[in-house]
Amino acid sequence: MLMAKGHSNPGSVTGHASWQQLFRQWCDGELAAGHVGILDQAVPAFESIVIESALAYTGGRKKDAAGLPGWGQNTITGKIKELNLEPSAPPEQPSAHLKEDLMV
């Protein structure tokens, strides 16, 4: 297995499969199924997970979240739009009339 210089296999410490091992299994399965262009599916999924985790870790602060994967604020903002990760609008509060109608 190829690894970056100075990096160990994180799965070997805990006895569980590392994310790299699980990703390799996914790749092997996709290729065995005859799928091509698997990076078109894998890269956006990977980036989405990184962004969602970074935003959760920083309480939704894009500026702070951007540095965690090593990006700038403009990059994370662009990736959020590109990957359709814009937070959904908060639910609208019912109007006063609707509240009154519900109480009747």
Image (cartoon, rainbow, N blue to C red):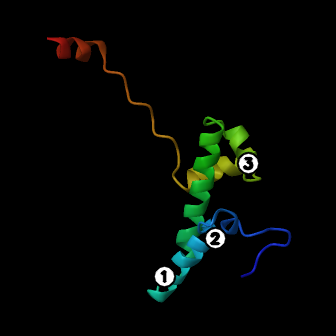
14 vs 34, left or right, is: right
Q: Which of the pair 75/32 is nearer the observer?
A: 32
Residue 65: quadrant of the picture: top right
Three-letter residue code for mark 1: Gly
Q: Position of residue 98 (x, y in %)?
A: 24, 17
Q: Position of residue 39 (x, y in %)?
A: 58, 74
Density class for disc 1 (Cα within 10 Å; few <14, some 14-19, many ≥20) is few
In the image, residue 25 sits, relative to residue 59, either above or below, namely below
Q: Are marks 3 and 2 in contact (CB under 8 Å)?
A: no
Callout 1: SS? helix
Residue most toward the right? 6
Q: Which residue is mark 1?
A: 29
Residue most toward the left? 104
Residue 17: quadrant of the picture: bottom right
Q: Which of the pair 39/21 is nearer the observer?
A: 21
Tell me the quadrant of the picture where the C terminus can be found: top left
Residue 37: quadrant of the picture: bottom right
Q: Are marks 1 and 3 in contact (CB under 8 Å)?
A: no
Q: Position of residue 54 (x, y in %)?
A: 65, 46
Three-letter residue code for mark 3: Leu
Q: Position of residue 100 (x, y in %)?
A: 22, 11
In the image, residue 66 sits, relative to residue 29, either above or below, namely above
Q: Residue at image x 72%, y 39%?
A: 64
